[in-house]
Amino acid sequence: MPALEAEAAGAEAPDVELHGWRDDDGPLAALAAALSGVRGRVGIEKPHLSVAWYELARSVAPAAEWVDGAAVVGDLRLVKDDDELAAMRRAAAIVDRALARLVEELRPGRTEADLAARAGQLIRDEGADGVAFEPIVAAGAKSALPHGNPDSTPVVEGDLVVVDMGAKVAGYCSDLTRTLVAGREPDARQRELFDVVREAQATGVRAAVAGATGADVDRAARSVIEAAGLGESFVHRTGHGLGLEVHEPPSLHSANLEPLLAGTVVTVEPGVYLPGYGGVRIEDDVVVRSGEPEVLTQAPIALEQSR
């Protein structure tokens, strides 16, 4: 690691041997020292290792066999212990409070970028170590983009506004999405779409129990949207694992036939997106249990802004 990070890393992991490198030396000598004499199989996490670093590592340990250990690490991280869940509960409570404050400021004329920046500030103000990801605020027709980039687009009265934000506490993430109507009461079409997604999301949450598969949860939520004739407008998986990363195993989609384990944390976030009109998504963080799932995020689910 860069020498400038070594002191902080050593404080976090005092039992780990660190090999620091200075900018004027470069990483090659430190990497060679770290991998000196390494033979046999070496596990790497391919999703997190750049091609450049992989090639550098191979060059200093040519006798090693490099294998992808991402699945091994992912399996170890699936089930959260009590300390991990405590951190995730705090992260969920923080994002709940931050969203409540943001909703009070969601007025016509504010831009997506302004509101997204404010969301990040409120998360920190409420006690988070930082944001879990850059907040998303998508208004009007842009709310039909599941991961739209906030920009200078202003919020217009009557817009559907999708807000997606998360906090990080002790390294662990929360991830919350709500959809609101800006500045006035929802119209009939907005209410119709919202009610379908809300029912789908509640159905998905109930299905997220130990022993069910990712496909089971996806099917439970998706079937509600399909029954409403909107199946083609639900364009992503129903949810994903949550922990040290915002997106980690397990994935809640139709091809995942692995049973969910008690203590795993997942998001449940169905959505409906109508290009040129707008979209609705509702997302909560859920602890898989043998009985009723534990919902960590508790922000109100409503189209209307509190007044």
Image (cartoon, rainbow, N blue to C red):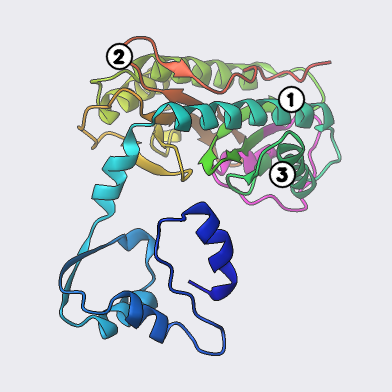
Compared with residue 94, is residue 196 higher up or lower down, i.e. above or below? Answer: above
Q: Amino acid at mark 1?
A: Ala
| Label of residue 120 in the image | 3
Closer to the observer: label 3 or label 2?
2
Percent position of residue 229, x then y:
41, 22
| Left or right placement of residue 69 versus residue 22 in this view | left
Q: Helix or strand or loop: what does disc 2 sit on?
A: loop
Percent position of residue 137, x then y:
68, 41
| Left or right placement of residue 58 versus residue 29 in this view | left
* Residue positioned 78% across, 39% down in the render: 155
Q: Is 81 inside the magenta-drawn segment? A: no
| Label of residue 290 in the image | 2
Magenta highlight range: 139-161
Q: Which residue is mark 1?
A: 100
Compared with residue 286, is residue 1 higher up or lower down, i.e. above or below? Answer: below
Q: Nearer the viewer, residue 59 or 131?
A: 59
Q: Main secondary structure of the magenta part?
A: loop
Closer to the observer: label 1 or label 2?
2
Q: Helix or strand or loop: what does disc 3 sit on?
A: helix
Q: Nearer the viewer, residue 273 or 285?
A: 285
| Left or right placement of residue 228 versus residue 108 in this view | left
| Left or right placement of residue 296 versus residue 153 in this view | left
Q: Residues within 10 Å of mark 3 (few under 14, many from 20)?
A: many
Q: Residues within 10 Å of mark 2 (few under 14, many from 20)?
A: some
Asked whether disc 3 touches disc 2, contact meaning CB atoms under 8 Å apart, the reply is no
Residue 39 falls in which quadrant of the image? bottom left
Q: Nearer the viewer, residue 281 or 249?
A: 249
Asked whether disc 3 touches disc 1, contact meaning CB atoms under 8 Å apart, the reply is no
| Label of residue 192 in the image | none
Badge 3 or badge 2: first in the primary sequence: 3
Cα separation, mark 3 vs mark 1, equals 13 Å
Badge 3 or badge 1: first in the primary sequence: 1
